């Protein structure tokens, strides 16, 4: 059974999708042992409480340096003997200390089809605003491993979503979550938990 930590910064809709997928059997051989929030008072912490999941808050503002923040994060994750770390709408950047402690064991959901609309500054509604301003007809979501380059790790799964006439950033964000993120994030977690992901350099293949 793989031990999963989910890192969150907001409402926790992707956290809820993971919880639901574990409960309905879409994710097998995995359980969430810890939710770590980047700040107090977010609804994701309430979701953890309602589902009996242990939670902690590790805020960057608590620490004098990035190194101290990373050290605290590594200690918390190692304490819970975590096998997989899932960034589910987590807005803090993890430093090299965390990434090196958990190589190919951190995954992120990004609300676009990488390599489009990704990298520093592309998060949340900023991604969808950029997609609409560019006039793309297709967007989507990507689950990828996390490395030292923002949104630069090996791609695990992607799913396309149509952009529709009259979309706003908020409308498009909701459609991408509902049609892509809530599907491919649990799928990727299930693949990891069942040792079906193979990584060769920066490319993923999936054992079926």
Image: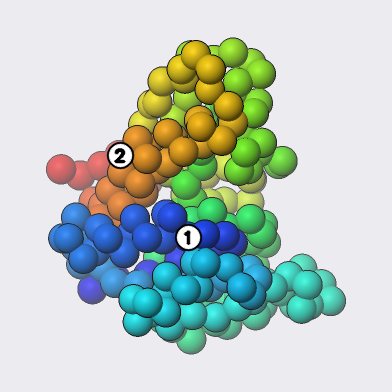
Quarter of the image for residue 38 reads bottom right
Query: From this viewpoint, is residue 122 visible?
Result: yes
Tell me, what colour scheme is on the image?
rainbow
Quarter of the image for residue 151 reads top right
Q: Nearer the viewer, mark 2 or mark 1?
A: 1
Image disc number at residue 12: 1
Residue 76 drawn at (x, y percent):
55, 82
Residue 122 drawn at (x, y percent):
66, 38
Image disc number at residue 139: none
Dot 2 surroundings within 10 Å: few (below 14), some, or many (20 or more)?
Answer: some
Residue 133 drawn at (x, y percent):
66, 18
Local secondary structure at mark 2: strand
Q: Which residue is mark 2?
A: 205
Is 89 situated left or right of 192 in this image? Answer: right
Local secondary structure at mark 1: loop
Residue 7 drawn at (x, y percent):
52, 65
């Amino acid at each position: 059974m793989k031990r999963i930590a989910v890192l969150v910064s907001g409402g926790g809709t992707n956290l809820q999708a993971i919880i639901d997928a574990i409960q309905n059997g879409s994710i097998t051989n995995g359980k969430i042992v810890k939710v770590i929030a980047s700040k107090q008072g977010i609804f994701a912490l309430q979701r953890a409480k309602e589902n009996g999941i242990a939670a902690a808050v590790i805020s960057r503002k608590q620490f004098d340096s990035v190194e101290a923040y990373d050290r605290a994060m590594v200690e918390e994750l190692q304490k819970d003997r975590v096998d997989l770390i899932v960034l589910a709408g987590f807005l803090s950047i993890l430093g090299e200390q965390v990434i090196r402690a958990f190589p190919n064991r951190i995954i992120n959901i990004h609300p676009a089809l990488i390599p489009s609309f990704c990298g520093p500054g592309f998060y949340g509604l900023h991604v969808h605003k950029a997609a609409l301003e560019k006039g793309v007809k297709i967007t989507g979501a990507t689950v990828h491993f996390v490395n030292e380059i923002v949104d630069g790790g090996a791609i695990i799964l992607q799913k396309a979503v149509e952009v529709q006439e009259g979309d706003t950033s908020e409308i498009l964000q909701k459609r991408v979550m509902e049609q892509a993120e809530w599907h491919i994030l649990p799928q990727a977690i299930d693949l990891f938990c069942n040792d079906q992901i193979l990584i060769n350099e920066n490319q993923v293949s999936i054992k079926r």
